[in-house]
Structure formats: structure tokens, C-alpha cells
Amino acid sequence: MDAILFLTFAAIAVACAINLVLQTHPISSALSLVGVMTSLAVLYLLLGGSFIAAVQVIVYAGAIMVLFIFVIMLLNTQGERTQPKKNVLPIAIALPLLFSLIGVLAAIVATQVPAGEIVKFGTFSGGDPLTFGRAMFTRYLLPFEVTSVLILIAIVGAVVLAKKEI
Amino acid sequence: MPPIPTVVPMSWYLILSAILFTLGAAGFLLRRNIITVFMCIELMLNAVNLTFVAFSHQLKQVDGHIFTFFVMVVAAAEAAVGLAIILTVFKNRQTLEIDEISSMKL
């Protein structure tokens, strides 16, 4: 069951990432990025990170991507101009080389790298909000407070950039 | 063809993370639209987050999740400031092609 879930959502993530790179219009890329983020949230759940999976959906797929789509809509951009194909020869040489490189790397990884410990759902529950909050507000309290300063700087910077002519 | 294993080893998560990071880096280098380039940076950050969470599972400690949380915070701040810069650039030059905004001065 773990393997089926992992393979399904890993395939969705990789397919969406490839689509992100290949699409010419930013809106299509943004939707693909949302697909990558939500499937990564499922993988976080499989790894026992329930809190971080929720934050991934709410903050990343929710807030940050809404900001992106807002800017894309505001700028009303067109798709990229496709440049005229000049020469097919480099692509014809590069593609087989790329695939052979990927094949060799996959063979090396499959034979040389140890598989590591088995990841099984439910063996690690240290990512729940209770444990997370305890660590965040005891051991990592100072970085947490410093982060608030960073966000304040970001707010001031965004307001200054948006306010007047530069 | 070997049968599909029923359990997931640790290395699969790291390989997936490496694939996503490579795709993000490739998009960063290949795309010409500044917003798409920005989204590729977010993709790379997500790939790094997956590595953090995977190692957190392996070491049975919550620290990796906290690092992931901080990466998300920095990504949110970066997106706010970066998109404001993109808006300003578009206001001044009426283009989003990164080849046409290669000079700092107008």
C-alpha cells in the first residue's frame, strides 16, 4: 500500500514538474506547481509529517500560489514567443546523450547506493502538531523570533516597492 | 522485469527529490518568462523540503520538519518581495522576457 501511494503521487509530482517546465503560459505552469505541492503534501503524510503536510497545502498551495496567480492575472501576460527552430542537429545529438546519461546514472544509483531503511507509514509520528510546537517554542524559539523580523522586512520592502515610482 | 516492491526504501524519496530539483534547475535555466523562472525556484525549494522531511523520518527527530517550516517562511517572504520587484519591472519596461531586462539601468 505504501509503495502504491508513493509511486502514484511521485509520478504525479514528476509529471506536473515536467509540465511546469514545458508550458509556455505562466498560468499553466502555476497550476502544475499546485499539483506538485499537493502531491508532495501527501508524501509528507506518508513520512509522518501531518503538521507540515497541512502547512504545505495552506501556505504553499494556498497563499503563495494565490499571490503568483494574482500577479499573473494583473500583468495579463501572453505566452512566451517561441523562437524559430534554427537547427535540429544539436537536439538530435543531445537527446540520445541525455537519455544514455540518465540510464547510466540510474544503473549506478540502483546498484551502488544502499536502499536505506524502509519507510513505513505509521512508524514515525514525531511530526504531529504537539511535538512540532514543543520543539518550535523551546529549542527553536530564537530562530522563530528572528523569522518574524524577516517577515517584517519583507512587508516593508514590498510596500516600498509597490508605493512609488522607482 | 522485477516485481514492484511493496515497501518503499528511503532512497526512493531522495531520488524523487533529486529529480524534482533537477527539473527546477533546468526550468530556471531554460525558461524566458520571469514568473516561470520564479516558480522554478519554488519547485527547487520544495524538492529540498522533501529531503528534509525524509531525513527527519529516518532519524526519528522533528528537527527536519522545523527546517521545512523555516524554508516555507523564507519562500513566502521571497515571493512577496520578488513579485513586487516583478511588478515594478513590468511597470517600467512593459516586458517579462528576462533577455530584454538584462541591463540594470533603463
Image (cartoon, rainbow, N blue to C red):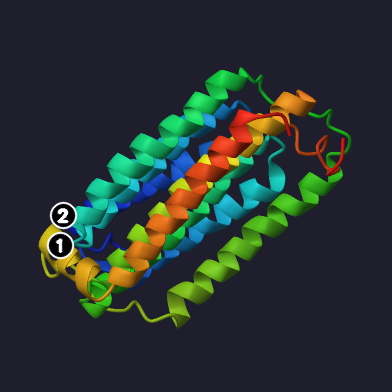
For the residues bearing labels 2 and 1, Cβ distance under 8 angstroms: yes
Type of amino acid at the residue the image marks with label 1: Phe
Residue B13 visible in this rendered orientation of the protein? no
Question: SS at mark 2?
Answer: loop
Q: Would residue A11 be found to the left or right of residue A41 on screen?
A: right
Identify whether A139 is placed above or below B4: below
Q: Earlier in the sequence, mark 2 or mark 1?
A: 2
Type of amino acid at the residue the image marks with label 2: Met
Nearer the observer, B36 or A35? B36
Identify whether B100 is placed above or below A97: above
Nearer the observer, B104 or A58? B104
Mark number, residue A141: none
* Chain of the residue where label 1 is placed in the rendered structure: A
Q: x, y percentage for residue A50? A: 18, 55
Q: Would residue A47 be found to the left or right of residue B18 on screen?
A: left
Classify the position of the C terminus of chain B by image quarter: top right
Residue B103 lies in quadrant: top right
Q: x, y percentage for residue A77? A: 64, 20
Residue A126 lies in quadrant: bottom left
Q: Would residue A160 be found to the left or right of residue B18 on screen?
A: right
Residue displayed at 44% across by 47% down: B76
Mark number, residue A1: 2
Q: Which residue is mark 1?
A: A121
Residue displayed at 37% across by 71% down: B11
Q: x, y percentage for residue A70? A: 49, 25
Classify the position of the N terminus of chain B by image quarter: bottom left
Residue neighbourhood size for the residue with mark 2, other residues' Cα within 10 Å, grouped as few (<14), some (14–19), many (≥20): few
Nearer the observer, B65 or B44? B65
Q: x, y percentage for residue A60? A: 37, 43
Residue B54 lies in quadrant: bottom left
Residue displayed at 48% across by 27% down: A69
